[in-house]
Image (cartoon, rainbow, N blue to C red):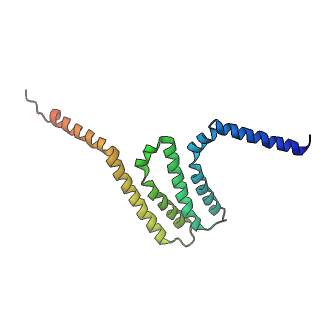
Amino acid sequence: MTNKQQGLGIWIVIAGVVILLGKLGVFSFIGSVFWPLFILIPGIVLQFLYFSRVLSAGILIPAGILTTYGLIFLICNIFGWGSMKYLWPLFIFGVAVGLYEYYVFSMDRPRPAYVASLILTIVSIVFLAVTLLWTIGIYFIALGLIIVGLVLVFGGRKRYW
């Protein structure tokens, strides 16, 4: 048996294993759970390339956006996509992260990038607060009303005996 035949045999075995794993659903599980890594890893790689002095500071804008979005999608994959109704303002924050990284690490420190990142962060926080108030804040309002009502019913009486 020659080395060529052994190499071909190894590739045929690998192909068979890949096909078998695919038919068993291994790849679909991995793909359905870890697909956000295809967004997160390029963001981290772009940041690594900047800090390795391979790329300029402008690459930090898409790097920050991709990293933030990858984390959002990973959180949604872990905790369920219903959490997106709370996390959607973080997409605005992702752009703010990219602009802020560009501002901090750029040699000329462009003030418009800082101002834009600050405005987007504030908008994101406001939307997040309104979303949380609208979705889960109603429970706190209801609990507060119950407590105030109980205090008025039971705590307001003066006892004279």
Q: Is residue 158 left or right of residue 143?
A: left
Residue 104 picture location, percent across and down: 53, 65
**Residue that sits furthest to the top in the current view:** 161
Residue plotted at (32% across, 48% down) = 134
Residue 36 picture location, percent across and down: 56, 49
Is residue 126 positioned above or below 155 on the image?
below
Examine the image and state in which quarter residue 7 appears: top right
Tell me the quadrant of the picture where the N terminus can be found.
top right
Q: Nearer the viewer, residue 96 or 16?
A: 16
Q: Nearer the viewer, residue 107 or 113?
A: 113
Tell me the quadrant of the picture where the C terminus can be found.
top left
Q: Nearer the viewer, residue 84 or 46?
A: 84
Number of dots carrying numbers: 0
Residue plotted at (78% across, 41% down) = 12
Q: Is residue 54 left or right of residue 2?
A: left
Is residue 9 positioned above or below 91 on the image?
above
Residue 114 picture location, percent across and down: 47, 67
Residue plotted at (44% across, 67% down) = 116
**Residue that sits furthest to the left in the current view:** 161
Residue 89 picture location, percent across and down: 42, 54
Residue plotted at (37% across, 55% down) = 127
